[in-house]
Image (cartoon, coloured by chain):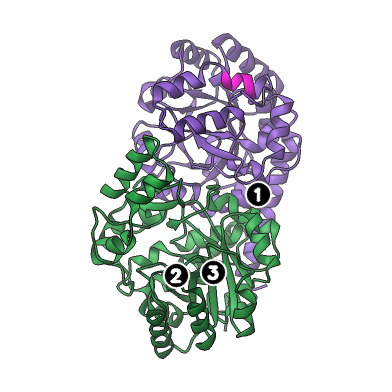
Chain colours: A green, B purple
Amino acid sequence: MPAPLFAQNRICQLFGIEYPLVQAGMIWASGWRLASTVSQAGGLGIIGAGSMYPAVLEEHIQKCRAATHKPFGVNVPLLYPEMDKIMEILVREKVPVVFTSAGNPKTWTPTLQAAGAKVVHVVSSSKFAAKAQAAGCDAVVAEGFEAGGHNGREETTTMVLVPAVRAAIDIPLLAAGGIATGQQMLAAMVLGADGVQVGSRFVCTPEASSHAAFKAAVLAAEEGDTQLSLKKLVPVRLLKNDFFQAVAQAEAAGADAETLSQLLGRARAKKGMFEGDMAQGELEIGQVAALIKNMTPAAEVVAEMILDYKAALASMAALQAGE
Amino acid sequence: MPAPLFAQNRICQLFGIEYPLVQAGMIWASGWRLASTVSQAGGLGIIGAGSMYPAVLEEHIQKCRAATHKPFGVNVPLLYPEMDKIMEILVREKVPVVFTSAGNPKTWTPTLQAAGAKVVHVVSSSKFAAKAQAAGCDAVVAEGFEAGGHNGREETTTMVLVPAVRAAIDIPLLAAGGIATGQQMLAAMVLGADGVQVGSRFVCTPEASSHAAFKAAVLAAEEGDTQLSLKKLVPVRLLKNDFFQAVAQAEAAGADAETLSQLLGRARAKKGMFEGDMAQGELEIGQVAALIKNMTPAAEVVAEMILDYKAALASMAALQAGE
């Protein structure tokens, strides 16, 4: 049930949640513990399947369900291997909400919806948003350039992307990228979003499965400490470390995709974000890390963001009333 | 005098204007005609001195003053040549507001303030915002990655930059980058800005001195049609054309600053934006060009943005009231 302020909110109605606040399904961060805590707190928690073998994902879904009776979701990058097995699990487990990304939303949306799931596709342009709507998706996430991890090639920021996507589709819209506070949540709603997806902020919670050293690095990050990297492969926003600098040097010297791919190698994301190798790991985080200064329990993150959202809304209402 | 809704607004009070809406001083676009029209409409119009010889600037200031009794400003990139002459003119002509960028705000702020001017410095990070405040500036413009033209190296977007700068300074704050509508203006205010600086939107007005072919190209621009270029020199957001592609190719092949500087050559900005060479000119415009679809008189741009701002604010107030 939506909270009173969000009684008419389409995201709350679609997912059956209290607040239009979705926790992003981030690899090596968003397991059942984080997802169930956020859902229990009134948002929508999401398990990030991108870093899980099918059997591991199944376990996380079951543990999440044991920890909360509230709706939750799973995020699936559609280009990952063993997609048949992943989808079979999502259908069998009747996962209420599935967020898909990096692939064609036409392929799996009907299968998932037939099993009762709401399907949301993540996009970085209004063109792809329109395609997701045409594919029958229930909602869209518009993710701006400032977001952590994999990112669009057009580099459109949240400030420009959200109104552009809003104009292109009718279905509910979540804004992502650069959102870690209640003020930013309200700003995204003013731009036309029905709700927000928040990633980086939830990395700095005890419930995130990210390595403690990575959480500490995110808390220490300042403006300019992340940058879009590996643009000749798939653009990804990374925290600047030795690995990032090696890539930047290679890129400045004109390295091609093949060279970058070799430099990246395998399992660097796990090495960094899960195993804590701060020098050689791939550290995916958003620009908004610069605003995150405290480790905070995930339920408190939700409560604080909603409190600040309400305060920001109240001060806008006061402005309107001429107070 | 601020309009009633903005009676307490610090930007309106600082400049003595009706609406906290500043038209950016853009090279080859913002002459006396555009600036005086925006000021006459209740915003703050700004003459862009970056593309003017001192004698030309003086003429524009005098014509602007003849066209409106309301306050207006001049934008000065501090690294340009003949700065002594420019400053002498600003002081002699008693220009009410001076926006400075690309240089140290300590150098000229006291001189300008002693002559009665309000001085505003443009920054792309909270570190530089704090320095501008320490230099005695009256306000700061925080300009995000999505903005057109010259841009910061840290690539921080408006969504993240505005709250970061707000937390770092106490003086009035203007948000810039990605703002062309009243909704975006309100979103920027929710993020902590006291007002906004709008560039790209004012290029698509009859009053802008930009070439008609450039205005048409901006109107035709879609998402992904601009990109940050020349990062090894000074990063600048450009509309993608033949010149942009030549630079992109050189950059992908590892070209150094010297090579890029030769590729850029001289007077390319004038060639593109003022003389209308859409293939070989340097075309500076923001990401928000994707949202601009109509040529509109500058006074109507101001009126529409304020109308949409009020409507967005009213719908937020209605949300707060549970309507």
Give yes or no for contact between labels 1 and 3 (Cβ–Cβ under 8 Å).
Answer: no
Q: Earlier in the sequence, mark 3 or mark 2?
A: 2
Q: Residue at x 50, y 87 (%)?
A: A93
Q: Position of residue A264 (x, y in %)?
A: 34, 52
Please, what is the three-letter code of the amino acid marked with disc 1?
Gly
Q: Residue at x 66, y 21 (%)?
A: B274
Please, what is the three-letter code of the amino acid marked with disc 3?
Thr
Q: Residues within 10 Å of mark 2 (few under 14, many from 20)?
A: many
Quarter occupied by residue B113: top left
Q: Main secondary structure of the magenta part?
A: helix
**In this rendering, is residue B131 above or below B323?**
above
> How far separated are the C-alphas under marks 2 and 1?
33 Å
The kind of secondary structure element at disc 3 is strand
Q: Are the residues under marks 2 and 1 on the same chain?
A: no
Q: Which mark is residue A100?
A: 3
Q: Which mark is residue B182?
A: 1
Q: Residue at x 64, y 44 (%)?
A: B180
Q: Position of residue B73 (x, y in %)?
A: 57, 26
Q: Which mark is residue A25?
A: 2
Q: Which residues are magenta?
A: B268-272
Q: Position of residue B254 (x, y in %)?
A: 40, 32
